[in-house]
Amino acid sequence: QVQLVESGGGLVQAGGSLRLSCTTSETIFSINDMGWYRQAPGNQRELVAGITSAGSTNYADSVKGRFTISRDNAKNTVFLQMNVLKPEDTADYYCYIDANRRRYWGKGTLVTVSS
């Protein structure tokens, strides 16, 4: 069973930066979209950013200009560079990979932004 392994979460002060990474436990072929969702306590899970196999990206309005998504296809890895972090960015961040007509999910990594 393929697993997604996330890393890079942690505690940071407002205005700081973090870089999240998500990679697969084994090689997956024919990966399409990759991306990140987040879920704060009491809130629904929301899409943060996505990136297609062609490199097209989309972002939630709340993170545009601050977050950048990228991918390394050779390593089955997706990244999320988060700059100018705000306390409202505090959440569990989940990566996903779409491949072979299914979506794989990571278990989440916690990002906490202190004011």
Image: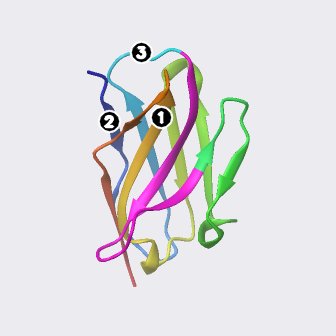
Residue 35 among magenta residues? yes
Residue 12 vertical placement versus 34 (above, below): below
Mark 3 and mark 2 in contact? Answer it, CB < 8 Å. Answer: no
Residue beneath label 3, please? 27
Q: Please state which amino acid type lies under the numbered disc 3.
A: Thr
Residue 11 visible, this orientation: no
Of the image marks 2 and 1, the number of the one nearer the N terminus:
2
Image position of 54 (left or right of 18): right
* Residue 94, image x, y percentages: 38, 50
- Whether the residues at callouts 3 and 1 have beta carbons within 8 Å, the answer is no
Q: Amino acid at mark 1?
A: Ile
Q: Which residues are magenta?
A: 30-49
Q: Going from the N terminus, do you reach mark 3 or mark 2 first?
A: 2
**Amino acid found under the numbered disc labelled 2:** Val
**Side of 56 where 91 appears, left or right:** left
Distance between the Cα atoms at labels 2 and 1?
11 Å
Q: Crowding at label 3, few (<14), some or many (≥20) Cα neighbours within 10 Å? A: few
Residue 30: x and y in percent read 56, 17
- Report the residue marked by disc 2: 5
Where is residue 84 shown, x and y percent of the image?
57, 71
Q: Could you tell me how far apart the alpha carbons at marks 3 and 2 are, in whole angstroms?
A: 13 Å
Which residue reaches farthest bottom? 115
Residue 17 shows in the view: yes
Query: Measured from the top left, where is residue 77 in percent x and y?
Result: 49, 31
Dot 1 corresponds to which residue? 97
